[in-house]
Image (cartoon, rainbow, N blue to C red):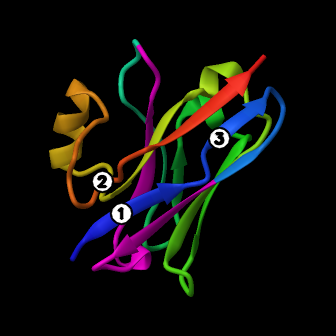
Amino acid sequence: EISVMESGGGSVQAGESLRLSCTTTGFRVDETEMGWYRQAPGNECELVSTIDIDGSTYYTDSVKGRFIISEDKAKNTVYLQMNSLKPEDSAVYYCAAEPRSAKYTAATMAGCNIGDDTWGQGTQVTVSP
């Protein structure tokens, strides 16, 4: 069975940190590109960060220098370390395999609630001023 599951969301104050985790079943995180999307109420579904099988990474401009994506192959887990959090980082964060695939590039135009087996259910991050 293939699945993706996020954890680690919560409520923090501006300037604090959170670490999101993403684990998978049915496939290994180091076998494919993995990534994080987020969506806040009234906003579009936004690609936040990705990590490819060669270790190369991508960050959207608004999180560069604050967020770090990484993988622990032994734990089959992808992490998103979020530092210096801002209220505008508040959103539901979703983990996905092949986040930049044509399938998800098209689907996310309608929002982040994808409901696919290689797309997680989301974890809420709330940052207070």
**Residue 80 as seen in the image, left or right of residue 123:** right
Give SS at disc 3: strand
- Which residue corresponds to the image point at 80% horizontal and 35% vertical from the top-left? 84
Q: Assign the C terminus to one quadrant of the image.
A: top right
The answer to whether 15 is drawn above or below residue 94 in the figure is above
- Mark 2 and mark 1 in contact? Answer it, CB < 8 Å: yes
- Which residue corresponds to the image point at 44% horizontal and 65% vertical from the top-left? 52
Residue at far bottom of view: 74
Residue 93 in the image: state x and y as whole percent.
Answer: 48, 41
- Which residue corresponds to the image point at 53% horizontal and 65% vertical from the top-left? 78
**Residue 119 as seen in the image, left or right of residue 12:** left
Q: Residues within 10 Å of mark 2 (few under 14, many from 20)?
A: many
- The image quadrant that residue 3 belongs to is bottom left
Give SS at disc 2: loop
Q: Residues within 10 Å of mark 1 (few under 14, many from 20)?
A: many
- Front position in the image: 100 or 17: 17
What's drawn in magenta, residue-wise? 20-41
Residue 70 in the image: state x and y as whole percent.
Answer: 60, 64
Task: Indicate yes or no whether the magenta region holds residue 16.
Answer: no
- Mark 2 and mark 3 in contact? Answer it, CB < 8 Å: no
Q: Which residue is mark 2?
A: 119
Give SS at disc 1: strand
Q: CA distance from mark 2 to mark 1?
A: 6 Å
Residue 51 in the image: state x and y as whole percent.
Answer: 48, 60
The answer to whether 102 is drawn above or below residue 91 in the figure is below
Q: CA distance from mark 1 to mark 3?
A: 19 Å
Q: Which mark is residue 4?
A: 1
Task: Indicate yes or no whether the magenta region holds residue 27.
Answer: yes
Q: Amino acid at mark 2?
A: Trp
Q: Judge depth for marks 2 and 3 and give the one in front.
A: 3
Q: Which residue is mark 3?
A: 10
